[in-house]
Amino acid sequence: MTTARRSARPAITDATWRDLARAAERVRKHAHAPYSKYRVGAALLTSRGVVSGCNVENAAYPLCICAEASAVASAVSQGYTRWKAIAVATEGPEAGAPCGACRQILAEFGTDLPVGLVVAGKVLRVVTVAELLPFAFDGKILAESTAPKAARAVTKKAR
Ligand SMILES: [Zn+2]
């Protein structure tokens, strides 16, 4: 397992990654993937335990929900927006990384989040959201761009 540790976040122990990987693998079995047959499970480690989600496909393909988005929506719904890590379990043999949309969804809550890529219940690789989505679009960019002109001038001057 490759561990990318480049932030101030506390390190995730191997035992915790194992538990998180198992949780992602467990929820993967609940995936509704009758079209792609590509089942994905995601497990977010919150301050109060694990919140998970699976992919939910739809006959109207654009309505499909990814496992990561499902887990994020569930965690946020339960009041958890600060996470320690996420494990994403895919079919294999290669570890599947979150899609572009999910990278953006995860980036909304912090780009230093470690993402464990899991196959068969084992973490094959750990990367950060920043590594998956460099130069992410974020709320700061939006705030600066939509601030009143006077505030923008002050922000510009301060740089
Ligand atoms: Zn996705």
Image: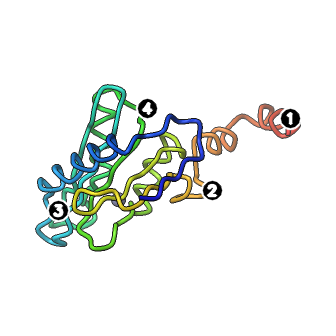
Q: Position of residue 120 (x, y in %)?
A: 22, 62
Within-10-Å neighbours for mark 2: few <14, some 14–19, many 20+:
few
Q: Give the foreground label among 4 and 2.
A: 4
Nearer the N terminus, badge 1 or badge 3?
3
Circle nearer the viewer, 4 or 1: 4
On residue 43, the disc is none
Residue for point 31% across, 40% down: 73
Alpha-carbon span between mark 1 and mark 3: 49 Å
Q: Which residue is tagged 1? A: 158
Disc 4 or 3, which lies upstream in sequence?
3
Q: From the Cβ of disc 3, is ligand 1 less than 8 Å away?
A: no
Q: Nearer the viewer, mark 4 or mark 3?
A: 4
Badge 4 marks a residue whose secondary structure is: loop
Q: Earlier in the sequence, mark 2 or mark 3?
A: 3
- Is label 2 or label 3 in front? 2
Please identify the quarter of the rendering in which residue 7 is found. top right
Residue under pointer 3: 58
Q: Is residue 144 above or below residue 123?
A: above
| Residue 32: quadrant of the picture | bottom left
Q: Nearer the viewer, residue 21 or 111?
A: 21
Residue under circle 2? 135
Left/right placement of residue 107 relative to residue 24 reads right
Residue behind mark 4: 82
Q: Earlier in the sequence, mark 2 or mark 1?
A: 2
Q: Label 4 to label 1, Cα distance in Å? A: 30 Å
Q: Name the secondary structure under disc 2.
A: loop
Q: Give the camera-side residue of 18 and 36.
A: 18
Q: Mark 1 belongs to which amino acid?
A: Ala
Mark earlier in primary sequence (4, 2): 4
What residue is at 50 percent from the left and 52 percent from the top? Answer: 128
Q: CA distance from mark 2 to mark 1?
A: 21 Å
In what quadrant of the picture does the N terminus appear? Answer: bottom left
